[in-house]
Image (cartoon, rainbow, N blue to C red):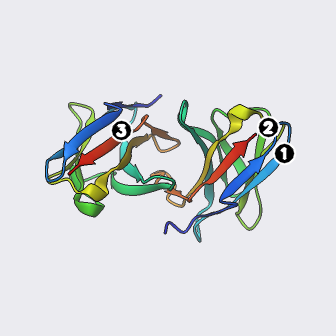
Amino acid sequence: AQSVTQLGSHVSVSEGALVLLRCNYSSSVPPYLFWYVQYPNQGLQLLLKYTTGATLVKGINGFEAEFKKSETSFHLTKPSAHMSDAAEYFCAVSDRNTLTFGKGTMLLVSP
Amino acid sequence: DSGVTQTPKHLITATGQRVTLRCSPRSGDLSVYWYQQSLDQGLQFLIQYYNGEERAKGNILERFSAQQFPDLHSELNLSSLELGDSALYFCASSGNRGINEQYFGPGTRLTVT
């Protein structure tokens, strides 16, 4: 069985500050890992993914995430938050058969 | 635009009724997934179809059923609706067997009154 834990249901940052959204996973096989973003009243949009190879993965809108096997983590970062980054972010893990989502973290950006 | 389409965008109906939600996957994708998203339950996986066959089941109620047709579009049928079924219903599709990278549609917002 696989699972995803996202620490913090809400994270607040100021515009221009570092964004750090935490994700820890458990998986019985080498995982594929994903971050999705959901803007209000919209579907989930794929931000980035890790499958194999380089552990630092770059995605859209300036986001990146680093796969750390020893820590079973896949934290999402962005150096400088923008007001348009305010949304809900979901981490997900795949064991090749099913995709399991975390409960989501709402990112709030203040001016 | 993910390439996944869902209709209708909004649906308002009464308790006890039956509705059908429709999803067209991205061109070439064989897998379709259905999810329910509500404030109290979060994002819940309901069911997956692959090339017309049921592949995986999640937290899908017996009142709910789905199917995937030969042209690969899928329908989610919800019957004997209850107030608690009010939610956003998403369809996603995937073409990469094994990686399971899913692309989501815009969702159908169901309101049961």
Q: Please state the chain letter of the residue tagged with numbered disc 3 in the rendered image.
A: A
Give the residue at x 58% y 39%. Answer: B45
Left or right: where B55 falls relative to B99: right
Q: Please state the chain letter of the residue tagged with numbered disc 1 in the rendered image.
A: B
Q: Position of residue A37 (x, y in %)?
A: 39, 52
Q: Which residue is mark 2?
A: B81
Q: Position of residue B43 (x, y in %)?
A: 53, 39
Q: Which residue is mark 1?
A: B18
The span from disc 2 to disc 1 (Cα, nearest Å) is: 6 Å
Label 2 is placed on what type of residue?
Answer: Leu
Residues at marks 2 and 1 touching, judged by CB atoms closer than 8 Å: yes
Snapshot quadrant of residue A90: top left
- At mark 1, the secondary structure is loop
Label 1 is placed on what type of residue?
Answer: Arg
Q: Position of residue B53 (x, y in %)?
A: 73, 51
Q: Which residue is mark 3?
A: A105
Q: Earlier in the sequence, mark 2 or mark 1?
A: 1
The span from disc 1 to disc 3 (Cα, nearest Å) is: 33 Å
Asked if residue A62 is positioned above or below residue A98 in the image, the reply reads below
Let me know if residue B66 appears in the view. Answer: yes
